[in-house]
Image (cartoon, rainbow, N blue to C red):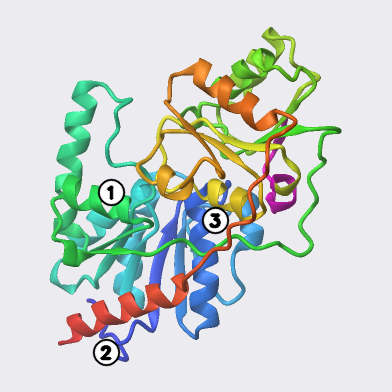
Amino acid sequence: MIRQRTNPGTARHILTCAQTMRGGGVERAMLRMAQGWIDAGRQVTMVLGSREGPLADEIPVGMTVIELGDARYAALGALAATARRTAPDVIFCPGNHYSGIAALARLRLGRGCPPIIGKVSNALVRAELSAGAQWRYRRWLRLHPWFLDHVVAMTPAMAAEAIAEMHLPPARVSVIANPPALPREGAAPVALPEGRYLIGVGRLEPQKRWDRLIAALPMLADRDVTLLILGEGSARAALEAQVAALGLGARVTLAGHAADPLPALAGAAVAVLTSDYEGVPGVLREALSVGTPVVSTESSVAVREIVTGDALGTVVPRDDSAALVAALDRWLAPDAVRPAPVAPGGDPIGAYLALFDRLAAQRSR
């Protein structure tokens, strides 16, 4: 039995989910948004597979957490049962990774399902996949209009990609940026290398292709510059083996998760992103917000919406190692001029709540 919702026409209660607190950008952004929604007087409930991971310290005070004690993705199927019990006004799907859970909730709740809003967190055109995998991915995307009432993209180019790949009408797609990262009081400081260093921030997973950046290090003109990578993940052993094989143990530090990467980004000579694919990479915005130039692969249609000119950084093809080295050499040159800090704009918290309220009001009518 699905409980009757209170306050029809207003999204007083927002339900969301996360698999673990191990440190992904999707989950970190969702926690920042949830804090803003709570501060605005809304109730936020999160179905959480496992609290395991460093982001557990960032769970907002006032958020209701229903922990399942099971880190498997399938455990999040409990989202539908939670919706039946708690009668949220909207369900927020925080990224592409969770689309399957949103589809299952729609299937199980049927006409009693509240509006589901999904955020696009990764590229919807995946050139690195095999032809068969690309076909299957496109077919999956075409199903999204059935179970998502509305899609949020973080930039106009990502919105256009969602409209094209999901076959969504433009009225069902909004552009809302993530809230900016802010300094965290009491966060353990990152031990910074001596001298000039490059920095990479992101999970140690195959998608991020940190092997490209490590391979570029001995080819740089500056043989003293070091590399600091902040993040944790399943590719650690492979990356450590690569560092050892190249004799770069003194020049590469895999420092693990950082609760607050902003000071390390501010001190770096260049922030580097070498991913195969991304959504709207927050680390590029964070680096530019503290005046650090960026070098990024062409991993998303949104990258050039962030790196809007040569004064901010350089965008290179994914598999062009020579272009990556040349771009890094350019920004490491003695005459390179660091960009002025780029301040974030807009009110993403208010924009999300206005969208949630509109969808809740449409449903109540």
Mark 2 or mark 3: whose residue is earlier in sequence = 2
Residue 15 position, x and y percent, is 39, 70
Q: Which residue is mark 3?
A: 28
Regarding mark 3 in the picture, which secondary structure is present there?
Answer: helix
Task: Name the residue nearer the viewer: 273 or 204.
Answer: 273
At horizontal 55% and vertical 29% (from top left) the residue drawn is 234
Q: Are marks 3 and 1 in contact (CB under 8 Å)?
A: no
Regarding mark 2 in the picture, which secondary structure is present there?
Answer: loop
The local crowd at label 2, few if under 14, some if 14 to 19, many if 20 or more residues have their Cα within 10 Å, is some
Mark 3 or mark 1: whose residue is earlier in sequence = 3
Q: Is residue 139 magenta?
A: no
Label drawn at residue 100: 1
Q: How far apart are the two marked residues, 2 and 3, measured between alpha carbons?
A: 30 Å
**Which amino acid, by three-letter code, is at mark 2?**
Pro
> Looking at the figure, which quarter contains the C terminus?
bottom left
Is residue 211 shown to the viewer in this render? no
**Which amino acid, by three-letter code, is at mark 1?**
Gly
Residue 205 position, x and y percent, is 52, 31
Task: Name the residue nearer the viewer: 286 or 83.
Answer: 286
Task: Name the residue nearer the viewer: 120 or 307.
Answer: 307
Q: Which quadrant of the structure image shows residue 220?
A: top right
What is the residue that sits farthest to the front in this orientation? Answer: 335
The local crowd at label 3, few if under 14, some if 14 to 19, many if 20 or more residues have their Cα within 10 Å, is some
Q: Nearer the viewer, mark 2 or mark 3?
A: 3
The local crowd at label 1, few if under 14, some if 14 to 19, many if 20 or more residues have their Cα within 10 Å, is some
165 sits left or right of 178 in the view: left
Q: In the displayed structure, would residue 175 be above or below residue 2? A: above
Q: In the displayed structure, would residue 218 be above or below residue 314? A: above
Residue 39 position, x and y percent, is 55, 81
Residue 316 position, x and y percent, is 46, 28
Count the labels in the image. Answer: 3
Q: Which residue is mark 2?
A: 8
